[in-house]
Image (cartoon, coloured by chain):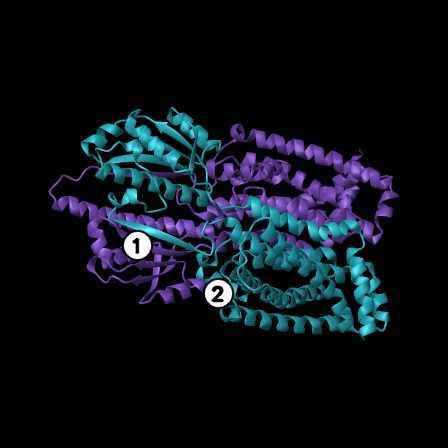
Amino acid sequence: MSFRRLRAMFVKELHHVTRDSLSLAMALAMPMMMLLLYGYALSLDVDHIQSLVYDEDHTSASRNLVRQFQGSQYFDIIGYVHDYHTVERAIDSGKILIGVVIPRGFAKDLDGGSGKVQLLVDGSDSNTASIAMGYAESVVQGYSTGVRSDVINRNGTHPPGQIDARIRVWYNSSLESKNFIVPGLIGVILVILAGQLTSLTVAREWEMGTMEQVLSTPLRPAEIVLGKMGAYFLVGLVDAVISVVVAVTIFAVPFRGSLLVLAVSTCLFLWCALFTGIWVSAGSRTQVQAYQFGILVSFLPGFLLSGFTFSIDTMPKVIQGLSYFFPARYFVTIAKGVFLKGTGFRALWVEMLFLVLYGTLIFWRTVKKMNQKVA
Amino acid sequence: MRERLRVILRKEFIQALREPRMRFLLFFPPLLQLVVFGYAVTLDVDHARIGWMDMDHTPESRALEARFVGSGRFDIVAQPQSEQQTQQVLDRGQVHGVVRVLPGFAHDLARGRPIEVQVLLDGTNSNTASLISAYSQQVIAAYSSDVLTGQTKNLQTIKVDIRGSTGTHTMLTPAAPESRVWFNPDLYSRNYFVPGVAANILLMVTLMLTSQAIIREKEIGTMEQLMVTPMRPIELMLGKTLPFAVVGMVNLLVITGGALLIFHVPFRGNFFLLLFCAALFLMTSLGAGLLLSTLSNTQQQANMGSFFVTTPAFVMSGFMFPIRNMPVAVQYLSYLNPLRYFMEIVRGIFLKGVGISVLWPQMLCLFVYGSTILTFSAVRFRKTLD
């Protein structure tokens, strides 16, 4: 390995990067776009649940219950209707998520201890639906408790103690989606970017026929891939810095851990992601193939199997096992740990070790693949 | 004209499907996405791993523990004995939360004093945390309400039923919610996601492949050869887009088949309506692909460009993230997104079984969008050729 040859390759590749200013501009704008999109637009928090109320009972009891729904911050009652059909149509067209139906005789049944409230829920989005249902049930339960203590008070008995759940949330106490999405998103941004930039780099040279020229030089395969990687590493690093700065300043994501751990992990991860791209590229003769294959091995696992929005531990065991083969999983764990939990090297060294192992392995495979192609 | 069109179509089909590797790459990733979204991606929380820290050690505290386990939503995987261990299991992510029953729980319960049960949650994943918070509140509230009214009863024998409103509860809770869930009664995430995958794939495949196919000819220099043939621009355009429309449609069929056979996603609507709407949507995505090819010079630019189109379309389509939760400005912005309309159509047809009478506004939007972008890009495409 000669440093001079390596540098020459690096400079050549850097020219490629800077010459195509449109691609470079897009590469630098991408983190901003992703962060803005996911940070602002994306929220799994459920509030302002659009709902309709159909009160068949028209008693003070039923009106009291409706008032409880009005008072809840989670429900936006967009109207009161007088027939069942309107509720059905509103759910069909997706105008409302929940229809609250208080059947006739509610007040009477309440005295008998068997009042029923009907909640009609649009379950197509199961996540939103179950959260909304939880809120609705706790509204009804709260109402129910109120009624019961009224009854107990009237009977003159001493109201017994009540158990309250005291919920305390750690790491992300306001339970904001952005806090949990943005740190993981940095990993996704890097993996996509690395895939986009490198998956074409060798395939393009094959397609354009310039690979033969490179091969006729005394460059060794390891020098070729390292030189190529170096140029894109710079772009990736700039993007990583942009992402972290934007996350902390614009999105006010808490940063509790060590910057050093994050920096080292980012470099390790970029190495892994970039070499994965080059490996893919070295194995493909056309850019279309390289790109599609790149999506398959970097984008999809980075997005779906990294735990960035979808928690891995609810997945089936086979797929959980699969996720260990992709570096994105480790980096997302590190990023979330450093940002939100403030965990350091001691809790994260396993993930970092895996990144090192993966990086070594993929570098070795890439060099080998180049060797094969050259021969 | 027909002869020339036939020839270029043949050439493009051969080019797209020549290599076994390419065939694999055209049809395998959509299948993989289907499987991953069908099996893996779920926002449901079924067996939340929690730590149980019982500092009271009484029959009452154990009864509460039994409630948590019996609810079927919690798996107790750790029993931290100290503050430090609690910290540790949460830091390492071994548990999603820790429930702490403080000393004196049973004592205060008997005296009728207000009691607190502490639930510490890992909020890193805010979605999971809110679900677990809601579930644990339900369990504790149900236990509390049983204790309130039936203090003499044997606590262990009371049946727990959070969702429903069964006979055992009517005595204890004067008013109970009776939830009826429509369209997806079991609340499976996959019923929601899998139809959406079809819409996504259609966009990704057609947009990317179309723009790449054209740019590739430019980049390699074979575009000049095509231009010296008597081929007209419109024929070239059709030849470059139709094969990928076919590939997209085949993918749609494969995904629909997979959704029905593997995942048993309900299909309640009209299949031909789905195909028709897909064709409407293809006008937009192929048009966008053409447009992209006129704007970029290298395949790299085309790829990045298509990424810049598909990502916002994906995020603002309501595929994974409900549009109603977005800021109002973004919600309005999402009306510009054709994928949003197609997503609503696909889900409407699959899950709700609605027809043209409900979906016509979305279909109209797709048509207007598609014809505009197709005309615009066709004009531009001609210009770049001339």
| Closer-to-camera residue (A320/B103) | A320
Instruction: Point out residue B250 in the picture as x, y percentages from the top left corner.
Output: 68, 58
Label the cyan chain with its letter.
B
Identify the residue shown where x is 85% and y is 41%.
A374
Q: Disc 2 marks which amino acid?
A: Tyr
Give the CA separation, mark 2 to mark 1.
34 Å
Q: Quadrant of residue B281?
A: bottom right
Q: Chain A is drawn in which colour?
A: purple
Residue closest to the eye, A28 or B345: B345
Give coordinates of residue A241: x percent, y percent: 58, 45
A324 sits left or right of A222 in the view: left
Q: Which chain carries label 1?
A: A
Q: Rate crowding at label 2 as few (under 14), some (14 to 19) or many (20 or more) other CA atoms within 10 Å.
A: few
The x, y position of residue B360, in whole percent, is: 52, 71
Q: Looking at this rendering, what residue extends furthest in the right direction?
A: A216
Would residue A138 be found to the left or right of residue B213 on screen? left
Q: Name the residue under label 1.
A: A117
Left/right placement of residue B38 relative to residue A55 reads right
Residue at left offset 46%, top offset 50%: B187
Instruction: Decide if residue A241 is in sight here.
Output: no
| 2 or 1: mark nearer the eye | 1
Please tell me which residue lies in front, B367 or A179: B367
Q: Residue B332 carries which label?
A: 2
| Residues at marks 2 and 1 on the same chain | no
Looking at the picture, which amino acid does disc 1 mark? Val
